[in-house]
Amino acid sequence: MSLTIPFGTDFVIAGIPRSGTRLLWTGITDKLWTGDKNGKPSIKTHNMAPKTAPSSCKCFFIFGDPVLSIISTKLKRNAVLSPRHLQNCESEYTIETLPDIYDEDALNYERMFDTWTNAIGYPVMCLRYETLYNYIGVIEHFVHAHTYFPKWKARSSMIEDQDSDDINRIRKTYASLIEKIRKFPDITIRGL
């Protein structure tokens, strides 16, 4: 399902599942202007990047440590994965047929990263979850307004709490994505 951004949408907050999209969306939209999300149309999504976006729309793509995102997705699978999530991620699977995401990129995390970090024709601020709070001023400059982020909280999914065989499976399956994210800047604006 290709993302279409309706005219009049002010913000698109996209990201790899469990990488901070809700935190970024809340920080930018919750108390901005009137405090009413409906006052400033916004989209929070895990879709692939669209081909075009309205010129007035500010797009964000947030990513984080893929190992922790994958662990969190699997641990919270029943709470966070729905048929719509699978459709947005352009997964070929259903909830019932979804393979173990430790062994297959069945949610297209790498493809999602590639489409957003290589978007052309509209600006996309790409930022790393783990360093987001270092760049609040840059985010505010990009949106031309103050933001309202909650106090920083560390992730609840930690590598130290996981089985080393599981970590090795994830690192093998997502080796290419892990390397791309390792080399990617903490924040950049692409697509101009």
Image (spheres, grey):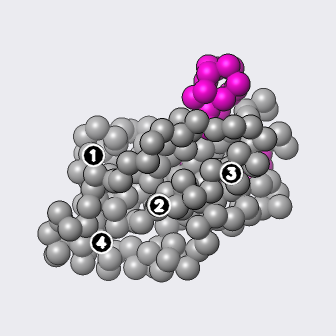
In the rendered structure, find residue 77 and report the number of the disc placed on it. Answer: 1
- Seen in the picture, residue 119 relative to 58 is either above or below; the reply is below
Disc 4 versus disc 2: nearer the observer:
2
Is residue 56 at all visible to an observer of this figure? yes
**Label 1: how many Cα within 10 Å (few below 14, some 14–19, many 20+):** few
- Seen in the picture, residue 119 relative to 51 is either above or below; the reply is below
In the rendered structure, find residue 186 and report the number of the disc placed on it. Answer: none
What amino acid type should be assigned to the residue bearing mark 1?
Answer: Arg
Residue with the mark numbered 2: 130
Q: Which of disc 1 and disc 2 is earlier in sequence?
A: 1
Q: Which of disc 1 and disc 3 is earlier in sequence?
A: 1
Q: CA distance from mark 2 to mark 3?
A: 16 Å
What amino acid type should be assigned to the residue bearing mark 3?
Answer: Gly
Q: Quadrant of the N terminus?
A: top right
> Residue 26, image x and y in percent?
53, 35
Residue drawn at x 42%, y 66% is 65
Residue with the mark numbered 3: 137
What amino acid type should be assigned to the residue bearing mark 2?
Answer: Glu
Residue drawn at x 30%, y 71% is 170
Residue 128 left/right relative to 17: right
- Nearer the observer, 183 or 130: 130
Q: Quadrant of residue 85?
A: top left
**Label 2: how many Cα within 10 Å (few below 14, some 14–19, many 20+):** some
- Nearer the observer, 93 or 47: 47
Q: Secondary structure at mark 2?
A: helix
Residue 72 left/right relative to 161: right
Q: Secondary structure at mark 1?
A: helix
Asked if disc 2 and disc 3 are in contact, CB closer than 8 Å, the reply is: no
